[in-house]
Amino acid sequence: MRRPFIFLNWLVSLLFAFLGALLMLGIIENVNSTSEHIFWGGAFFAVVFLCGFAGFQISLLLMRQHFRIIRSPRWAAALIVCAVLVFAVGAGGQALFMLSSQETTINSTVDIVLLLDASGSMDTYGYSYARTDAATQFVDTVSEDTYMQAVSFASIVLDSTELLPMDVTGKQTLKGFIDDIDSVGMTDFDSPIVQAIDILSSAGRQDSSKAIILLTDGEGEFSSSTSQALLDANIRLFSIRIDASGSNSQEKQALIDLSVRSGGFDTRLVPGADGSIDATELLEAFQSAFEASTQRELYMRQELLACSNDVTLYQFAIRLATFVICSVIFGIGYFAQFKIGLVVCNAISGALAAVLVTISGGGYSLCAVFISALLAAAYTAPKWNGGDTLDV
């Protein structure tokens, strides 16, 4: 009876832990901030532990007709304490992993959509000349390996060029388009940002950075779906706002926040005492955004300890320690007992999981590899005592 019981125990535990890992990977794909990475990094280990335990208990229930199960009176307390410890170890390992990551910056080619506010207020307050002068000078300064599209917008997209290489012909086309912009209507950001995302996603070059430079003197709305689409497409937004007011409305703050979240930044230009805006200052804002858009920053801290595939030796040591400690806690939590054989086997299993995850590069292969930490618990702890008693 021992062999069929252990196989079922292992199989059901594996299945439930696998499903828990899949669930957590789906959640973690949408995580952005550092604190969220730490929290969900710990939650990943805890959920796999609890799901595997649930599978283990179900396997015991399925075998009730063959065995009389006698559990330790400490099993519930041990489960809770070990779940908390697994979460803490996982979160701590994730934090150390991110602290040890290195940020590197490389220069790359860039595809840019230049969104130019053509609402009526640009004429009313005399900003149209500065917009035209600075934007045409900016086009002249970009490198020839840049691709750029110019878009004029108000409450809707008014007109646009194609996404063009910035050779002599491409620059002439863009400058002619900018010279001919007429200002009319109100301001809305949703449709121009959506169009910029679409063109960069469909016509942008695969190996180039993607950026949107948005010039406006007004406030506009954009939907949460547009905001998420920008982040999902890995497009950086650089907002340049002509703004005489020192206070930020909800719409202004939303644009600023989206710029920062996307990896870009917001620049506020304050009109002079006569209400005009300096074209030179506006040109510098364009150039700063362009320079930042050509720098591709690689943040390893955006990756999860349990599945990033490019790690330093120190980071691998953190991963190894985290997996080993969590695997040992797995066994103790499952069976509410501390045995040397259990500890050793689970430690070996956790080390094997860390090595295989690193070799495989993570992803979905992580699920099957990581859950190998359950094998030692499934094979070591159940002990056949004869009669109708199985000591777990």
Image: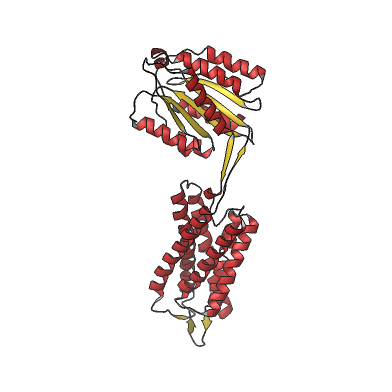
The answer to whether residue 328 shows anywhere in this view is yes
Q: Where is residue 361 in the image (x, y as percent from the top left)?
A: 62, 54
Where is residue 144, by image quadrant?
A: top right
Q: Which residue is drawn at 38% across and 24% down?
A: 243
- On the image, the x and y values in percent for residue 98 come to 52, 53
Please tell me which residue is depicted at 47% across the width and 74% down the height of the picture: 332
Q: Which of 66 and 333 is in front in this view?
A: 333
- Colouring method of the image: secondary structure
With 219 as the anchor, is 205 left or right in this view? Answer: right
Where residue 225 sits in the image (x, y, percent)?
A: 45, 36
Asked whether, in this view, residue 323 is left or right of residue 359, the answer is left
Q: How many marks?
A: 0
User: Foreground: 117 or 168?
Assistant: 168
> Where 336 sits versus 321, above or below?
below
Which residue is at the far bottom?
387
Where in the figure is residue 257, as x and y percent of width and height? 42, 36
Q: Residue at x 48, y 65 (%)?
A: 49
Relative to 94, does residue 82 appear above or below in the rendering? below
Residue 6 is at least partly visible in this image = no
Q: Residue at x 54, y 15 (%)?
A: 178
Q: Is residue 27 left or right of residue 356?
A: left
Instruction: Look at the image and tell me in which quarter the N terminus lies.
Output: bottom right
